[in-house]
Amino acid sequence: MSRAPGQAHHRQRGHHRVPAARGRVEHGEVAEAGQPSQELGARGREIRALRTNPAEVGKVQPHPANVSGLVNKPGLFTTLRVRDGAIRFWPAHLERLRTGAAELELRLPTDAQLGDAIAAAVGDLADARVRVTLHPDGAPSVEAAAYAAPAAPWRLRPVAAAPRRDQVRLKTTARGVYDAARRAAADVDDALLVAPDGTYLECTIANLFLVDPQGRLRTPPAAAPLLAGIARRHVLAAARALGIDAEEGPLRPREAAQARECFVTNALFVAHPVAAIEGVARYPGGALAGRLREVAIQRATENRIIP
């Protein structure tokens, strides 16, 4: 049966079916009309699992600063995609949560508890965007909404930023640097953070890749002040599997102007083409991005299957 582009396909998932909920999610709680899902059973009962508005799942509430100007202990989150019952890149997401939770001293549920909570939040959605958040002041939360991958290539706007590595190397709810950059690029698809030395870092929700005139893959180094994402890692592995030279190193506007292709990566769409970096270059297509996306997904054989 055909359906309109972007329309969610629903399927029955037995006792994991969750009534749709709408409203604004704030620190894992549902404001206004949103409703938590049903009880998760003994293994998952302490995790808040809920269905929410698709526009809200990608939002992280601003993290408050204390009176001295220092940011209080942040929460930790990861955003993942569940498609036809498979949690894409599940081992990598678990690794991210474990590493961050240990460093920030946050309570991490068992793998089984997290899996149950994700299943309950996703319910009968065939394609879902899910955010798992570990809060410093309470139980973890899982939010899910229908997901439709972006159709058109992105436009990026360079925005000056000066993040410290300790601010961005973990995926925390302290996102002031990203939020400020996003506000400066609200009328395009995303901001491209530019360090004080003129090098490109990343976008607010994705990592940056260029394909140079020789066909080599280029991306900013993981040692830079950026979040080295899960899809970034898998795309680099896919490039190696295809015999494509891949290099991590500083990228500047001159490299972007000379590149024959540009794309961005994150765990939801894996790799997505960029049509233009404002004031720098336009790009004709995303052939390599599509190829790397397919190979990265094919090689991700350890996805957890929701029962």
Image (cartoon, rainbow, N blue to C red):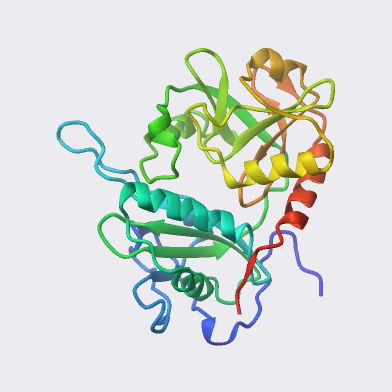
Q: Is residue 271 visible?
A: no
Q: Is residue 154 visible?
A: yes
Q: Is residue 84 toward the left or the right of residue 117 in the image?
A: right
Seen at 84% across and 21% down, the residue is: 214
Seen at 77% across and 16% down, the residue is: 258
Q: Quadrant of the C terminus?
A: bottom right
Seen at 66% across and 63% down, the residue is: 302
> Horizontal and vertical percent for residue 179?
42, 36
* Residue at the outermost left position: 67
> Horizontal and vertical percent for residue 114?
46, 68
Seen at 50% across and 78% down, the residue is: 18
Place residue 141 in its image quadrant.
bottom left
In the rendered image, the vertical position of residue 180 relative to residue 146, given as above or below: above
> Horizontal and vertical percent for residue 85?
64, 72
Q: Is residue 113 toward the left or the right of residue 222 in the image?
A: left
Q: Nearer the viewer, residue 218 or 270?
A: 218
Q: Nearer the viewer, residue 212 or 122?
A: 212
In the rendered image, the vertical position of residue 238 relative to residue 97, given as above or below: above
> Horizontal and vertical percent for residue 98?
44, 55
Place residue 210 in its image quadrant.
top right
In the rendered image, the vertical position of residue 69 relative to residue 296, given as above or below: above
